Structure formats: C-alpha cells, structure tokens
Amino acid sequence: MMWKKRPLAALALSLALLLPTPAQGAEAPAIHAEAAILMEAETGQILYEKNAHRQMQPASLTKIMTCLLAIEAGNPEQQVTVTPQALDLMEDAAAIGLQEGERLPLRELLYAAMLPSANDAANAVAIHIAGSEAAFARQMNRRAEALGLTDTRFVNASGLPVQGHSTTAYDLAEITREALRYPSFLDYAGRPSYFIRPGPENRGYSFSHLNRLLLPGSGYFDARAIAGKTGWTVPAGHCLMTVAEQDGVRLIAIILRAEGDGTMGGPYPDTKALLDYGFGSFRRVELPLPAEGFLGRIQESEYYLTPVGTTVGLMVPAELPREGLTVQLVGTAEGEEGRFWGEAALRNAAGEVLWQGGRIPLTGELLLGDLLGPSAVAYLPQVAKEVPRLPLMEFGAAAVVAALVGLWRLLARRGGKEPAGGPSAERVTQRPGAIK
C-alpha cells in the first residue's frame, strides 16, 4: 500500500440551512426592495431571499462590520482622539459634529456610529484602530474573507459612496450574525437613544436610533425588534438591517435598495412583511441527526463524513407534523474551501420527503483509496506526518483492522447498498490506486 503525506481534515462548522423555495402552504411575501434576505440568527438558515447574492452598495450598513471589528479590537473604555482625517466628510454626510482633538471612549463613538449613523464617529473608530481608513478597510476585508464571504469589498468604514465599495444582502446577514455573538453589539445597535455626557475633553451629544422599528410611537415600532442599522445614499437607496426576536427565535432581516421612506416598497413595510413571514410560517424543531456517516467527494478528494453533534435545530414550515420527523443526509454540499456540508431531507414516519434543502455541518476525514485483495478498495484516513512506504502487511494488525473497518463501512452498511450521497459500491470496489 502506498501512502501520501496529506493532513487529516476534521472540521466542526456552525450550522447553515437553506430553504430555496417557500414553505408548503405559506405564501412568501411580496418584497419591493431590489434585494432582501431573512436569516435565522443561530444557525444561518435562510427563510427568504431575493437577489441575496447580488453585489450592491450597502450605504451605512457597512458600519455593522465597523462595529464588529471595534468590539473585537478590545477595551471599549479606551480613549479615542478625533483627528482631522476623521472629520473629512462629503457634503451632507450624517455626523454628530465631533471636533478635532476631542477625546471620547470607544464605546461612545460606537453608539454614535450605530444609532444616528454618524460618519465622523465611524471614521474616528477606524483611524484609532488601524491608523488610517485605508488600513481599517483592509482589516474589514480580511474579516469578511475569514467569514467565507467572497462577494464583499469594503473601501471605507462608513459606507459613504465610493467606487468599488460593495457587498450583498447575504454577506451583510452573515456579518450581523457574527456580530450577534457579542452581547455588546445588541446594546450598540439596539438602544432607542443615547446621551454622551460632556467630559473634560469632549462635548455632550444626544441622539436617537434612526431605525423606526425600534422607536415606540414612530408608526413603525415593532416590539419584536431588538437591534438595527439604517443606511441611505443616492446610489444605494434605502437600506435596513433589523434583528428581531420572538419565542426564543432570533431573525435577521436585510433590505437593500428600497425606494420611498415608508410607503409601499419602503424598507419598513418590507421588513415587517419578512418578520411576519418568518415568525408566522415557520417553527423551530430539534431533531436527532443520523448516527452514520457517508463517503463524499469534495473536489477531487474522497472524505468520510460524519455529522457534527447528535441533534440539529431547524426552522421548518409550521404546517408540518410535530411528531415522527427524521433527518436524512442525501448528499454532500460543497461550501467554501475547507467546509463540509451534508444536504438534508426531512421525512415523515412513512419515509416520505416532506421538505428538503437544509445543510448539516459535517466533520471529514480525508481518505486514501488503495487495493485490498484482488478487487476491493479500502479507504483509510490520511495522516499529517510522514509514513513509511511499506506493503499493507508490514503495517501490522492495526492497519489491517482499519482497512477492514473502512471497507465494512462502505460496502456492508445497508446490505452493501450505496451510502446516501456517496459513490456506488461498484465504483468503490473497482477503483485502483490512490485518490489525488
């Protein structure tokens, strides 16, 4: 048997689930904005999308990433000095009127950036953290890349219009979902109003949230809303991010390029329609995951894939039965590099598929296929260190047992039938040589 030096891949990923079509019996809302998405915050399950991967200008929804990086940067009480560069804004840009040389705690500037969308505050945060807006934009892009977001490119920390600054509704929802891992984000993005007290080195500032879903008496107030961010520029149109919670379920709604400010097609009616749809047409269930794994092909390599955890939380159509539901893996779904997913189907007690489209997180072991005997191929985990190139028998009993176990898993399960999502037993037994 010939071994090659390859690392063992073992990855545990956060759950993401995709529902590409409306729920059975539930009518999807008519959204007038150019792009929109509704995402369950804990798992990343998509309940609704419209042009969710179209690259567009996000206006001040950019500041969600600015806030995330600032939270991750460290001490919210650290003093920030307002520089002349932070005050270099385009005409009519939103600002709270910071003055050069003022010093304020970082957290005060985050309230100003998130609630009234102050661009001078966002710039001051960026320059404080990275030394310049350009350097901070590079950090923003690296953070987006680390999240696996390939359709985002930030040029500044504020979202003011500039060539090449774009993202998608899906990417913004994922950035928001990451920010929600930090409890302080809900405070920065969820307070209806805030007052920065005057100090020895700063003036006092008072402002309210611009997201009217969070403002009692605004006409659009929604008690389910717990955080939000507004955005508007001429090229971006009206943009809105809202996080809402009901019965322990948290949803993220993103609206991009909505026309008007509250009539049909505006960001608020669209958001309310999404939240009503999400909370009204779905319910959350916790279901056991299948115990067995399966062989999956990711690009040009074979992996033995097994589910992460023993149960999975799903948002399922509300009209589905509450009892007798099971989850089955029906094939591999390739995500970003290094990510493994198994596509899931929901079945009833009779085995009928009621709903399909979920993604189950998997761990994976990169496998090597070699002949075992005259025809069968055994798949064994790769190793991260050099292994002597010796015949199979010279590896001793442990290697023989591993080979037989691997072969048994692939061929003997279900009476030799093809594992769900994996190659057929015939291909397994006839394929010679190593997987490359």
Image (tube, rainbow, N blue to C red):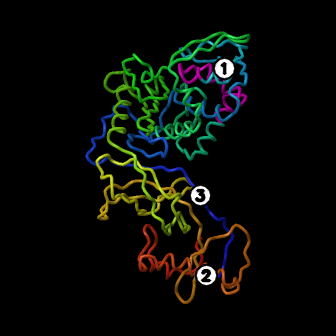
Q: Earlier in the sequence, mark 2 or mark 3?
A: 3
Relative side of 322 to 149, left or right: left
Amino acid found under the numbered disc labelled 1: Ala
Quickly name the residue at label 3: 11
Residue placed at 59% from the left, 22% from the top?
A: 111
Query: 403 or 287, which is in the foreground?
Result: 287
The span from disc 2 to disc 1 (Cα, nearest Å) is: 66 Å
| SS category of the residue bearing label 1 | helix
> Which region of the structure is painted magenta?
111-138
Residue placed at 73% from the left, 28% from the top?
A: 131
Comparing marks 1 and 3, which lies closer to the viewer?
A: 3
Residue placed at 54% from the left, 68% from the top?
A: 304
Image quadrant holding the N terminus, namely bottom right
Quickly name the residue at label 2: 401
Mark 2, other Cα within 10 Å: few <14 / some 14–19 / many ≥20: few
| SS category of the residue bearing label 2 | helix
Query: 323 or 385, which is in the foreground?
Result: 323
Q: From this viewpoint, which residue is outermost toward the left? A: 25
Q: Position of residue 428 (x, y in %)?
A: 49, 78
Quickly name the residue at label 1: 86
